[in-house]
Image: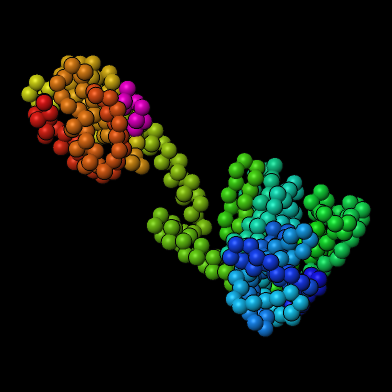
Amino acid sequence: MELYYEDPYLKSFSSKVSSVSYSNSHALIALEKTAFFPSGGGQSFDTGIILGKKGSAKVVETKTEKGQVIHICVLEGKIEPGEEVQCKIDWERRYELMRAHTAQHMFFQCLSRFFPNLYVIKDNIDVGRHALFIRSPEPLDFARIADAEKLANQTIKEGRRVIVRWMKKEEAEKGDFRVKLDRIKGSEVRVVEIEGFDKSACSGVHVVNTNEIGFLTLTRLTHEGDEYTLEFEFGEKAKEFLLDMKRITMSASSILQTHPELLERTVEKLKTENLVMQEQLKELNEEVLSRLEPTIKGSVKIYSKIFSGMDSKKLMDKAGELIKEENTLVIIGNRGERGFLLIAKNQKMNVDLKKIAGKAFEIIEGKWGGKEYFVSGAGKAEKLEEAIKFIIENVGGLHD
Ligand SMILES: [Zn+2]
């Protein structure tokens, strides 16, 4: 018997044990009736404790197997079939899941009002992470999401009842609510309604009134193509999240010497300016590269320079060209996320490049590879200067 459907607020109950079996180090206990929810509708399972006369079982997972609810337990002592046991579910965990699940129905309905062509792929209601996976033919913009959040919070405050009823599959086929009939195994469909607001087929456990959700907010939005993941939080945690966001917004505004309401515009402007500057820097770098002049040390010509944000391939091509000249050594660094370093020599030069590379890449704490006359690799950008200075200073000792 599914006590979690009869009374979703039942925290403890007693039942007769139907069966006990073992799998690895766990005891698998079935009860004649249970309030432990075995996961469903995207909602995670219940945990808790089962107490017998001669033992206690810590329920670490609950699942359905061949239509029967199985409590996966760490058992201490003994629990036997036929005995009466006292059971208690971890209410804090369950109540979070119930509230989150109801919040998920609410959030999806509100989003649908502003984005009419949404499709639910699935939801994932677990402790600490509540997520909704949807497909949308049009991009989800933050302005309309905010409208949906406002509507959700207004509806939460209205204290609407959440009503559950069962209906025949044939009847559900004609219903105007969210249902994936191909996923429903039995002949009956469980329909969860937020009174006058939203209806959907669902096997999860929900609260009975929307005001139990308290407050709802989106906390993270990611997408791959038209598939979106929306994570949300509710109640006190939602408020804490918003306070934290407010702190970040105000602090970022202060760094950029602007006001929070102008932050988006300021960031957009900076982004555009940055793109222009990167383009200019690239042109400048290429100009410098094309005019690179060598320094002479003994009989060796050394081309050496550190660039920033250059395309490494371009630097390698240029080095390849320069080392066609006799007695030529090229040492080029490039600062990016990491420091790029290349060392190349004219092939006829009697220099042990790999030996010097070994030491240079030790300085930048990087990895390298290449040929006798051309090596490159990456390491710490801030150490490039030191490495290049080392190579130049030791160039006299490069000959075997
Ligand atoms: Zn549900």
Look at the picture and state if 65 lies above or below 120: below
Q: Residue furthest left?
A: 298
Assign the N terminus to one quadrant of the image: bottom right
Q: Position of residue 197 (x, y in %)?
A: 80, 62
Quadrant in the picture for residue 351: top left
Question: Is most of the magenta stretch helix, strand or loop?
Answer: helix
Asked if residue 398 shows in the view, the reply is yes
Q: Position of residue 329 (x, y in %)?
A: 19, 24
Asked if residue 153 shows in the view, the reply is no
Considering depth in this image, is 364 or 63 the residue closer to the camera? 63
Residue 23 in magenta?
Answer: no
Side (left or right) of 117 relative to 362: right
Residue drawn 55% across the image and 65% down it: 242
Residue drawn 30% across the image and 38% down it: 367
Q: Position of residue 77 (x, y in %)?
A: 61, 78
Residue drawn 34% across the image and 36% down it: 309
Residue 315 in magenta?
Answer: yes
Residue drawn 11% across the image and 25% down it: 399
Side (left or right) of 79 relative to 76: right
Q: Position of residue 319 (x, y in %)?
A: 27, 23
The residue range painted magenta reads 310-317
Q: Residue furthest bottom?
A: 53
Assign the C terminus to one quadrant of the image: top left
